[in-house]
């Protein structure tokens, strides 16, 4: 199973989330790649669209591999096994963390028009274009949990099995359409996996 693009993946996810129609769910995309998936989900289930700001902390020598993730409100999630295997020094970790905190602040300024939509007592659906390690989504779940949603759902078009295992305890429901044993990277699940621009994301949010 390979998706044509992120919007197609979102439409497929929307079909799997039909049970949420009528609950006025809040659908939160993780920028940038999760936003077109979330937009299609929100359209399919009559949800309200917003973003949840988190940043992956990429391994210095392999930035696509998450050694952890940052979220708003100073949430930090570590992949301690990745840090250990990569022999990441404290100084190297701190350098990556500094850069990603700066990018998190930049995106907050760019993508937030005032305060984020309240999650309290809402059905909240966290959406990304896929999970390789689950660190970023785990951070997103912890940011969301702090706002006391009525129900927290994670919805993914694709995930590595170990990432799904990691994220499942962080949410009330995990909906994942595809968990291949040999997922080398999320991009392998898409024909079109281009790097989204800030303009593309802001246009979807409008």
Image: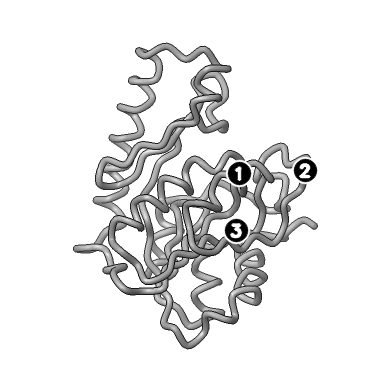
Find the distance from the CA under tag 2 to the CA under tag 3: 15 Å
Q: Is residue 58 above or below residue 6?
A: above
For the N terminus, the image quarter is: bottom right
Q: Looking at the picture, tell me which residue is in the foreground, 121 or 135.
A: 121
Of residues 129 and 163, which is closer to you in this image? 163
In the picture as drawn, the residue positioned furthest to the left comes out as 114
For disc 1, the neighbor class at 10 Å (few under 14, some 14 to 19, many from 20) is some
Callout 3 touching callout 1 (CB < 8 Å) = no
| Other residues around mark 2 within 10 Å, as few (<14) / some (14–19) / many (≥20) | few
Compared across the picture, whether 59 is left or right of 13 comes to: left
Residue found at x 52% / y 12%: 87
Image position of 171 with respect to 97: above or below: below
Locate residue 6 relative to residue 105 in the image: left or right. Answer: right
Q: Counting residues from the N terminus, which is met first, the one under dot 2 or under dot 1?
A: 1
Question: Disc 3 to disc 1, how far (Cα)?
Answer: 11 Å
Residue lying furthest bottom in this view? 22
The residue positioned 30% from the left and 64% from the top of the image is 148
Q: Residue at x 29, y 55 (%)?
A: 146
Picture coordinates of residue 164 (x, y %)?
61, 49
As helix, strand or loop, the secondary structure at mark 2 comes to loop
* Mark positioned earlier in the residue sequence (2 or 3): 3
Give left or right: position of 89 versus 109.
Answer: right
Q: Which residue is mark 3?
A: 156
Residue 156, percent across and down?
60, 58
- Residue highlighted by disc 1: 163
Q: Of callouts 3 and 1, which one flags the residue occurring earlier in the amino acid sequence?
A: 3
* Quadrant containing the C terminus in the rendered view: bottom left
Relative depth, front residue between 157 and 121:
121
* Residue under pointer 2: 181
Q: Assign a secondary structure to mark 1.
A: helix
What's the coloring here? Answer: one colour
């Amino acid at each position: 199973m390979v998706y044509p693009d992120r919007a197609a993946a979102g439409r497929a996810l929307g079909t799997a989330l039909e049970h949420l129609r009528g609950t006025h769910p809040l659908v939160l995309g993780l920028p940038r790649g999760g936003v077109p998936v979330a937009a299609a989900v929100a359209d399919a289930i009559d949800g309200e669209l917003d973003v949840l700001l988190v940043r992956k902390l990429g391994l210095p020598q392999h930035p696509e591999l998450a050694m952890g993730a940052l979220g708003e409100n100073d949430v930090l999630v570590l992949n301690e096994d990745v840090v250990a295997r990569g022999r990441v020094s404290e100084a190297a970790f701190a350098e990556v963390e500094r850069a990603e905190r700066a990018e998190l602040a930049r995106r907050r300024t760019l993508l937030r028009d005032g305060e984020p939509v309240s999650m309290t007592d809402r059905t909240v659906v966290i959406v990304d274009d896929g999970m390789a390690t689950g660190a970023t989504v785990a951070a997103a779940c912890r940011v969301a949990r702090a706002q006391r949603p009525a129900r927290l759902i994670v919805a993914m078009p694709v995930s590595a099995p170990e990432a799904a295992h990691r994220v499942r305890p962080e949410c009330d429901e995990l909906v994942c359409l595809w968990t291949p044993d040999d997922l080398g990277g999320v991009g392998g699940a898409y024909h079109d996996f281009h790097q989204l621009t800030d303009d593309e994301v802001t246009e979807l949010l409008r």
